[in-house]
Amino acid sequence: MFDLISKKNGNWKDDLLSGLTVALALVPEAIAFSFAAGVPPLVGLWAAVFMGFVTATFGGRPGMISGATGAIAVVIGKTVVYGEAQGEGLGLQYLFATIMLAGIIQILFGTLKLGRFIRLVPHPVMMGFVNGLAIVILMAQFGSFKTVEGVWFDQTQLVTMIGLVAFTMLIIQLLPKLTKALPSTLVAIVIVGLVNFFLADTRTVSDVLLEGTGSGTLSGAFPIPHLPTDIVWNIEAIKVIGGTAFAVAMVGIIESLMTLQLIDDLTETRGQGNRECIAQGGANFLSGLFGGMGGCAMIGQSLINIKSGGRGRTSGVTAAVTLALFIMVGGPVIGQIPIAALVGVMFMVVIGTFEWSTFETFGRVPFSEILVIISVTLITVFMHNLALAVLAGVILSTLVFAWESAKHIRLFPKDLDDGSRVYTLHGLLYFGSVREFAERLSTANDPDEVIIDFKDARVCDFSSLEMLSSVTERYKKAGKRVQLRHLSPECQQLLKDAGSLVEIVMADDDPHYTVARI
């Protein structure tokens, strides 16, 4: 429907221009997330600078943009409130300490190579994640059509705003069909900015600053590093800072790795999850050290960057450096950017983010998969907690898999000439299927010698070992003997590790058996 993402290799020109575009798009969101966390706008803006620069330079996913995010703002805000309760002006000190600790946790996470766990996220969870995120981004834009009191604009203002938004989207969609020399997003912002300055006069970035802080200017000197030494350390403070830091670290890692996976799919390349975790941690630590609120990967700005042609590290570095220049010397120019242009850009991001193929899955994939997609989407939309949504989706997918796998355990009995009976087992024997397996064995009706053949089955966990031990004991009490045959080396290792915890008899004629590796 919309050709929003082109799969191509980047170059210096594309990276520089897309970086400039991203820098413009970072400003209003960094300001908005600062307000959400209860801190001054410059705290969010400098966070975007440090997060963007460090992750672009050292991260595991070239082309991905990091900065201050809403999810981090919501979580970190509680430390600001707690800090202010300990003393006026201490809120930022507690915030900076929390962000620095979160960065250390993320560095440890990446060093231990735990980023590989993102591979456990099923595709339905990914679809629900991006769909929910697209809806959240869409809903966030509607506030731009209201006054600071939350009242919708009057008819004239509303029509003008909608017209400029539509004009922005039209330029972004049609310009690439004429020329790809310049990023359509950047051109749209510049053109709509000029139209607004000379003709329309709708709300600008300066107006947003004026409404939030009482000052319509955006300026600040480069920050100097400062350790949060004014914190009153006690058990309660350690709990608040430590608990919040861990939550921030996990939310940041999950959002960043999910965004990394999405960008991988769009660009048909592969990023490095563990390296990204380490870079995110370093960026958060430096952000807290230099007075920023921290953050993680931003899916909206990352998609803007990819759509504008940014593929290399230069685009992220350019965005961070340009944003720093905006803060220090370019505030008056940035202040004139109309909000309508940025809303139009984000609307196009929403269209490009949403998985429209979701609607094609209805009636074509199992209902359980659709349930996972809808569940993750709804949790993302209504709870605004992407990490919780992904975790819930993974758990739900796991439960569905366990339930379905338990149905597929099959046991085929065969009587031999020597009077013994062989049960050939097919499927995975694990905690979800052991009950079904045990119920299909007929201890009372079986002969004195019973063999269970695992040639086409696998013993997966301690629950299955315990059940096999229980079955062995059950036959023993009935005066019968049960033996296991064709256990793979991996299964035999499980038995060896369990030691005296389980009592299982291997068949005397059990041949050596190795699982084929594909």
Image (cartoon, helix red, strand yellow):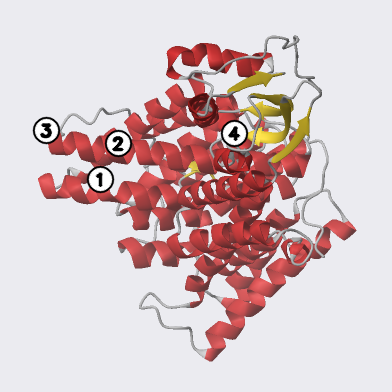
The answer for how far apart the CA atoms under marks 1 and 2 are is 8 Å
Q: Callout 3 environment at 10 Å: few (<14), some (14 to 19), or many (20+)?
A: few
Eye-nearest disc, 3 or 1: 3
On the image, numbered disc 4 is attached to which residue?
317
Q: Nearer the viewer, residue 368 or 383?
A: 368
Eye-nearest disc, 3 or 2: 3
The answer for how far apart the CA atoms under marks 3 and 4 are is 39 Å
Question: With 164 as the anchor, is 364 left or right in this view?
Answer: right
Eye-nearest disc, 4 or 1: 1
Q: Callout 1 environment at 10 Å: few (<14), some (14 to 19), or many (20+)?
A: many
Q: Sequence-wise, which precedes: disc 2 or disc 4? A: 2
Eye-nearest disc, 2 or 4: 2
The answer to whether one can see residue 322 in this image is no
Q: Sequence-wise, which precedes: disc 3 or disc 1? A: 1
Image point (67%, 14%), residue name: 507
Residues under numbered marks 3 and 1 in contact, where contact means CB atoms less than 8 Å apart? no
Image point (16%, 49%), residue name: 84
x, y percentage for residue 260?
63, 38
Q: Nearer the viewer, residue 284 or 164?
A: 284
The answer for how far apart the CA atoms under marks 2 and 4 are is 25 Å
Q: Which mark is residue 234?
A: 3
Instruction: Say which element carries label 4.
Output: helix
The answer to whether one can see residue 147 in this image is yes
Residues under numbered marks 3 and 2 in contact, where contact means CB atoms less than 8 Å apart? no
Image point (76%, 61%), residue name: 357
User: Toward which corner of the image does residue 166 lie, by quadrant?
Assistant: bottom right
